[in-house]
Amino acid sequence: MHEALLVMKKDLRLEWRSKVGIGQVLPFSLLVVLLFAFALDPERGVLERVTSGLFWVVVLFSSVLTIERAFSVEANDGIFDALRLSGMAPAAIYAGKVAALTLQLLVVEAVLATAVAVFYDTTWRGPVLSIGVAVIATLGIAGAGAVYGAIAAKLRSGSTLLPLLLLPLLAPVLICATRGFEVALGREAGPGWPWAALLGIFSAVYLTLGALLFRPLLEDA
Amino acid sequence: MSDEAYIAIAWIATFSSVGLYSLWVVLRGRKLSRMVPPDERRWL
Amino acid sequence: MTVDNTIPTPTGSATPSGSAASAGGGAGGPMSTSSTATRVLGTISLVGIAALVLFGLVLSPPDAKLGETVRILYMHVPTVSTAYLAFVITAVASVMYLWKRTEFWDLLAASSAEIGVLFFALTILNGMLWGKITWGVFWRWEPRLTTTAVLMLTYIGYLAVRQIPNDTRTRGTVSAVIGIMAIINIPITHKAVDWWRGLHQERTIFGTVNPEMRGLQLFSAYLGLTVFMVLFAWLLIHRFRVAWLTERAADVGVDAAIAERRAERPSGAVTTPAEGGAS
């Protein structure tokens, strides 16, 4: 637990110093928001209908960038080896990285939500459901993403592969999170909590799997 | 195209794809067998 | 370099394991990836395919609800079932690889995955053709097609990882992790897509399958399943052996390169290549 916190703090400190998340990923996500407005023509009312889906697609793209960054830093500086030799349990390292990723992604999502409220004229209703869905989904993205980030760092041309590997796996997250948001925004009827529950299953499964699979990934560096 | 034509395509495409893939695998097997010394090629 | 006690046993072999050398041409052992087991399976497959064509296309009647399109289902159901079986084998082999670290499990996982992707592609193709007849369009976002498309992309990623030149152990570990992550995603994706598309009452391919298939229709369906399973076993054995031989050929290549280097510089230091072989 303590070790996980150590890793998490290290990652967050790295991020704070380099400002890649703020400097690159956030502007990218805002850019995509704008691009879709250009592509989909604000006048025709399309943007309203696609808001939830667009939100989560942008989050997914931003996640790929964030994860890639989080692990390429490690690989370049040989930190993988250092972590391994430090004797910290791989599961703890994994937990720390997931925690750092989750926090970073939640920040991106918060800014994105503001941007969407402004640019797409969205009123964020149903905050409990929205925030619940967002947190659980982000945990799932970070949980699966951390594994694939480690993979991408180990492989040659891994960073090109990362989107192809991670995004199909996150398809259920995209579906459930979008539906959950639609219900929260009042644009879709029906209970929203089943979507959150399925997201919960996804996240629980992949957080567990990730903790188990991180050891073999770390060992062969 | 008639319905029967689509059904025919389905069956033909399925079996020919599997057939072509099988052919590729078997031919590669033969080519590799030649390159590799005999003691590595023991199949039960 | 290669160790004898990792000689592979073919999966799904129909014959009991006997002596090491098999029947087969060539003075120094089999000149192909065939063996008694594959010959048996292959013959059964061919006979089975002939029977399937006979029953599926000719003898069995068109369905009351589905009409002639039920004949596409005789292809579609077996291909998807076989694909799922292939990916389960990949997942189990991946777990075993992470545990035992032998080449056998790694190559089994990879071989099975490749065949699985092929059958997934055929599943989608058949589904699209069924859709063209039934819906008039090649694609609808109905649950099974959509799920299969996403899952297929997942496993294409798996195959992409196998293609990159990396040392064997890295490739094996990474593939195994992906193989395990991917299979767990199958039921979750199914559920998510079913709920999602269920909101729109799409006619699903399976929703319209008449569960009261009787007589020749039921027989054709089961025959299709059986034939494809046998075919899959045959393919898997061959493909595994090809993968095995590929690794051996790579070893031969590396050994030859080392020998050349040594011949060139009899007194100097020998630089060994960085390629890792089978561990």
Image: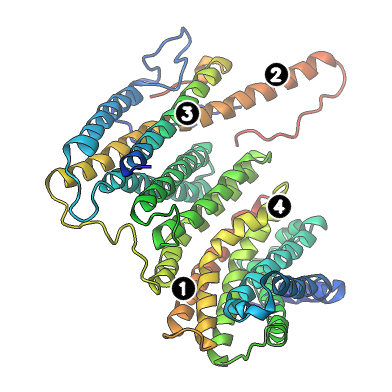
Mark 2, secondary structure of its residue: helix
Host chain of mark 3: C
- Vertical side of A193 occupied by C185: above or below: above
For the residues tagged 4 and 3, is the chain the same? no
Q: Is residue C31 left or right of residue C158?
A: left
Query: Residue at position x 74%, y 65% from top?
Result: A70
Mark 1, secondary structure of its residue: helix
- Measured in 3D between alpha carbons, the distance from the residue under mark 4 to the one under mark 3, in whole angstroms, is 31 Å
Disc on res. A160: 4
- Measured in 3D between alpha carbons, the distance from the residue under mark 2 to the one under mark 1, in whole angstroms, is 52 Å
Disc on res. C256: 2
Q: Say which of marks 2 and 1 sits in front.
A: 1
Q: Is residue A159 left or right of residue A175?
A: right
Mark 3, secondary structure of its residue: helix
- Measured in 3D between alpha carbons, the distance from the residue under mark 4 to the one under mark 1, in whole angstroms, is 29 Å
Kind of residue indicated by mark 2: Ala
**Image marks 2 and 1: residues in contact by CB distance under 8 Å:** no
Mark 4, secondary structure of its residue: helix
